[in-house]
Image (cartoon, helix red, strand yellow):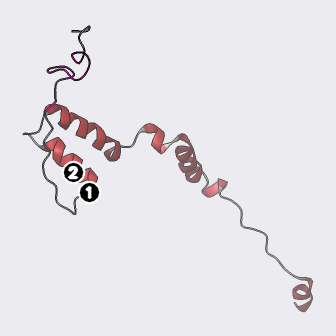
Amino acid sequence: MAGKIGRSGGARTGAGRPAIPPVLLPESPVNQTPLDFMLSVMRDGAADQRVRLDAAKAAAQYMHLKKGDGGKKDALQAAAQKVATGKFAPRPPPRLVTISNLLEK
């Protein structure tokens, strides 16, 4: 075939990757948030297990804080505010008095 004119090159039947069937997702109402949609896909028993797992992974980011999201700085700031009461509370600023106020008394 390679040596015959007009018989080489071009598309061949059966070549290439096999087609993957499309994943059918449940219809969502117009006023539904993306998080609600992901949760409904995750809870849908008729959906493919792979799709449900992907939806659960995506929704988990918005449901639970990671340790890094709270941060060390936020924890230190909260601890500092808790300690800064009573004996260690910041002192009030000095009272500003003018000389004319002192002379009048």
Report the amino acid beneath label 2.
Phe
Answer with the quarter of the image where residue 97 lies.
bottom right
Q: Main secondary structure of the magenta part?
A: loop
Q: Amino acid at mark 1?
A: Thr
Residue found 53% across the figure and 50% down from its top: 78
The residue drawn where x is 24% and y is 40% is: 55
- Residue extent of the magenta highlight: 6-21
Numbered-mark total: 2
Q: Residue 82: x percent and y percent?
A: 55, 52
From the viewer's side, name the closer residue of 97 and 27: 27
Give the residue displayed 16% in from the left and 29% down from the top: 19
Q: Quadrant of the N terminus?
A: top left
Relative to residue 95, is residue 46 depicted above or below? above
Q: In which quarter of the view is residue 12 placed?
A: top left
Which label is found at residue 33?
Answer: 1
x and y percent of residue 76 in the render? Answer: 57, 44
Question: In the picture shown, does residue 16 fall above or below 99?
Answer: above
- Most distant residue in the front direction: 5
- The answer to if 10 sits in the magenta stretch is yes
Disc 2 vs disc 1: Cβ atoms closer than 8 Å?
yes
User: x, y (%) of residue 104?
Assistant: 89, 92
Residue 67 appears in which quarter of the rendering? top left
- Residue 37: mark: 2
> In the image, is 101 to the left or to the right of 23?
right
The residue furthest left is: 46
50 w.r.t. 75: above or below: above
Q: Residue furthest bottom?
A: 104
Question: How packed is label 2: few (under 14 Cα within 10 Å), some, or many (20 or more)?
Answer: some
**Element assignment for label 2:** helix
